[in-house]
Amino acid sequence: MIYSQDTISHRTLDAFITRKSDNKVHSDLQVVPGISDHSAITCHLHLQKPQHTVRTSVLRNIKAIDRLLFARNVQLCDIQPAFSDSVGTVVNRYNLTLGNLLDTHAPAKTASQSVSTHNGTITKLP
């Protein structure tokens, strides 16, 4: 947050960056005229580390599947619908059978990753 220039030559030498969600970042701001054309800016900063969240993903190594063996196993599956089967029954059997095949050829692996978000913005005030 830049409230005013900190040099006589109207250049900004220092700034600090905050997250957009920070509503009260500092208090007791003071500008102290200094040596040469620089001023010292003092304040109390009220900053906190961003919260970490854990993101979990389910992954499959599809590229490692033996395509010929997978195709042969698909052909051996009994997913042909009977005349009396309802559409829902056929769809469920199809999904279950192919899901089991996929679990056999490319097992699902769970990966967790710690993530922290830094959506900081620079706000320049007149």
Image: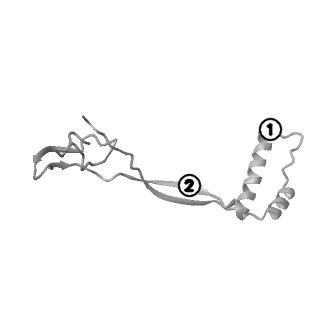
The residue at which mark 1 appears reads as: 87
Q: Tell me if residue 102 comes above or below residue 31 in the rendering.
A: below
* Residue type for callout 2: Ser
Which residue was labeled with disc 2?
Answer: 57
10 Å crowding of disc 1: few (<14), some (14-19), many (20+): few
Coordinates of residue 16 in the picture (x, y in percent): 27, 49
Q: Residue furthest right?
A: 83
- Label 2 environment density (alpha carbons within 10 Å; few <14, some 14–19, many ≥20): few
Q: Quadrant of residue 76?
A: bottom right
Disc number for residue 21: none
Residue in the foreground of this view, choosing between 26 and 122 = 122
Tell how many labels.
Answer: 2
- Real-space CA distance between mark 2 and mark 1, rounded to the nearest whole angstrom: 31 Å
Task: Determine the secondary structure under disc 1.
Answer: helix
Which residue is outermost to the front? 9
Residue shown at the point (10%, 53%) measured from the top left: 35
Q: Left or right of 9: which side holds 97? A: right
Q: Kindly indicate the quadrant of the structure image that contains residue 52.
A: bottom left
* Quadrant where the image shows the N terminus: top left
